[in-house]
Image (cartoon, coloured by chain):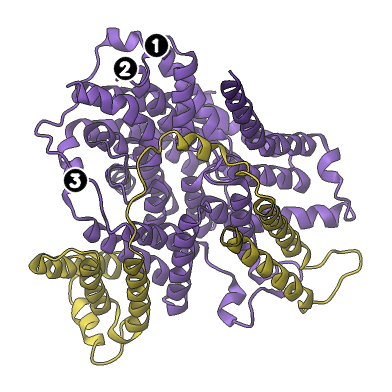
Chain colours: A yellow, B purple
Amino acid sequence: MIRAMVPYLVGLAIAAALFVYTGYLDYTPRPGQLGPATWPRLVIGLMAAACLLEIARVAIGGKAGARGIAAALAESGESESEPARFPALVAGGIALVGLYAVLVPVLGFLLATCLFIAAFMYLGRYRRHGAVWAISVAVTVLVGILFLRIAYVSLPRGIPPFDRITDVFFLIPGR
Amino acid sequence: MTDIVLQLGSGFLNCLTPLNLAMLVIGIVIGLLIGVLPGLTLVMGVALALPFTYKMDVTASIVLLTAMYVSGTYGGAFTAILFRIPGEPIDVPMLWDGYTMGRRGQPAKALGWTLVAAFAGGTLSAIAMVLMTQPLASFALRFSSPEYFAVLVFGLSSVVALGRGALANALISLSIGLLLGTVGTDPIYGAYRLTFGAPLLADGIEFLVVMVGAYGVGEVLSRLETGFAGKPIERIANARTELPTAREIGGRLGVLLRSTVLGNIIGIIPGAGATIASFVSYGVEAQFGKRKHEMGTGVAEGIVAPQAAATASVGGALVPLLALGIPGSGATAVILGAFLLHGIQPGPQVLATSATMVYTVFASVFLGLALMCLIGYFAIRPLVRILDLPEAVVSAYVLVLCFVGALSIRNSITDLWLMIGFGVLGFAFERLRFPIAPLVLGLILGPLAEEAFMNSMISFSNDWTIFFTRPIAATVMAATILVLLLPFYRMWHAERSAGGIGGR
């Protein structure tokens, strides 16, 4: 029962903390006006009410509450069994995207992306080594041309000596 | 009327400029591929395309995104019928009759019915869209801030009541989206709200970061959790489309019209998109149709009803977006985002200020439907071949697009971190069965709702009853209450039915 309540207890705690936090906004009050905390506090109230309702429902052992119409309709189509889950893969995926965010300012977008694609495919249990590296390079070049040379999107260059890769890339004729 | 026809004609000509036409074709092809690939949802695909449109002309951007939206409602039918893999939730009803017809040795015929339904439903709905947008926009010119607030509340409530997930979870998701929309500098008082001292948050949270993170990264993480265990694909040597005869179509005109009208109306209601249209339309045929007892056995009615309604919902969903500035679905929320990125606020004024652009978008829907059917008819084999790509490869590519989406806003690593954070939140939402659509719509519509609310309070001396005493606002508020009661009514009805069966 407590496990089912956890998300709503967390939600309620966040709502309470935010309610207090919005009480300390720095502004000059205007007579007859509600102030900048009014709207966030209304929303926080809505969130707290929804959390409290769910906590109460779980506490009294109530059956599942009302659901959106699409949820009820889709249920009739969900006949398949629950798939096997691999939490370690998710943890690896989150770690990998985090590592990418750490490395991209250093290695630059192109090199970090190429390495990321290869690493992610290995994580996703795709083990054809030649294909992994060929796809990584091809996708990086494709995305690089598309965004750096055609759409002119500014992407991280990295620090020396890695920024040279971006310099070389800019030798490709653009739009 | 003449004016509308002339403007639409001019829209067709604008659509045929090389850039717009290229965007239309690209959008249709990508939309079909998104529909085919089970790991890519329609909204996620449209959100991932948004960064491409930064430097583009606004009309070309909207044409691209709208084309993706239109064809995304159709592509999933191929894999649902051929392989029993619904590319989108929209295509689940296609499994019941479409796949069954395919198993009975008529997959080409099933695909032919899908094509006819998508084209007819989409085209009729697009005509309704052209005819309805101008009158609705003219009516909306009477709106003042209380009416706007009421309409926005209706839109947000519909997303909660009609969406996927428990009502309480949807409300919490909506609240988080609304709160994210308040982060940054308050527009009236200049106060920093929920920035926690971080200078980067003073400008607010970019909705693109949230959208790409929650839909893109979140979905990839969810698929990764299952080990990318997609179903093995059967080899279909002769995937082709066989169009039904005029006589066969004539026998199903009633279903076609009923489903189109239903899909269009459901599309207009904010929060109810193609998925609900598809399910409701199938349900109506199963309960009231001429061949209701044969539904699920591979009859054409079971294919026509969901497909016509799903594609018809697109025209419907574009009406409130263009006339009121309120997106009716996740995909239209992204299209609204594209408008805002280019400094255009859709709403009653947009037809006066940017009529050329609006009519070009209208024309692109008609052309897009025709192109979609042509490409679907002739290129079905290469389209379904994309399923041969390992999911790990497709997901890696999707993640790279997410990274570009976050970095392209202001080349800031903080945005990348924020996107990753929202990706993890999206995954947690998926895992805990919290719907993401209310969060995204709350983030986009929240600032508009707050502005309308605060302006109403300032103009009417903080009298909150104003939302219930002005006729239009009161009517919309009453509709809001009805929509919010709908899930409770459904729950009560289901319990009563179950009690009745149990009691027998």
Query: Label 3 to label 2, Cα distance in Å?
Result: 26 Å
B396 over B114 or under it: above or below? below
Query: Label 1 to label 2, Cα distance in Å?
Result: 8 Å
Classify 10 Å Cα crowding around label 3: few (below 14), some (14-19), many (20 and above). Answer: few
Q: Which residue is mark 3?
A: B232
- Could you tell me if the residues under marks 1 and 2 are in contact, i.e. CB atoms within 8 Å? yes
The residue located at (27%, 43%) in the rendering is: B36
B97 over A88 or under it: above or below? above
Q: Amino acid at mark 1?
A: Arg
What chain letter is assigned to the residue under label 1? B
Decide which of tag 3 and tag 1 comes sooner along the chain: 3
Decide which of tag 3 and tag 2 comes sooner along the chain: 3
Horizontally, is B38 left or right of B281 in the view? left
Q: Nearer the viewer, residue B495 or B33?
A: B495
Q: Nearer the viewer, residue B325 or B234?
A: B234
Horizontally, is B312 left or right of B486 in the view? left
Q: Which mark is residue B291?
A: 1
Residue B286 drawn at (x, y percent): 44, 19
Q: Nearer the viewer, residue A171 or A30?
A: A30
Q: Which mark is residue B9?
A: none
For residue B28, what is the image quadrant? top left
Q: Which residue is mark 2?
A: B299
B135 over A56 or under it: above or below? above
Residue A28 drawn at (x, y percent): 83, 77
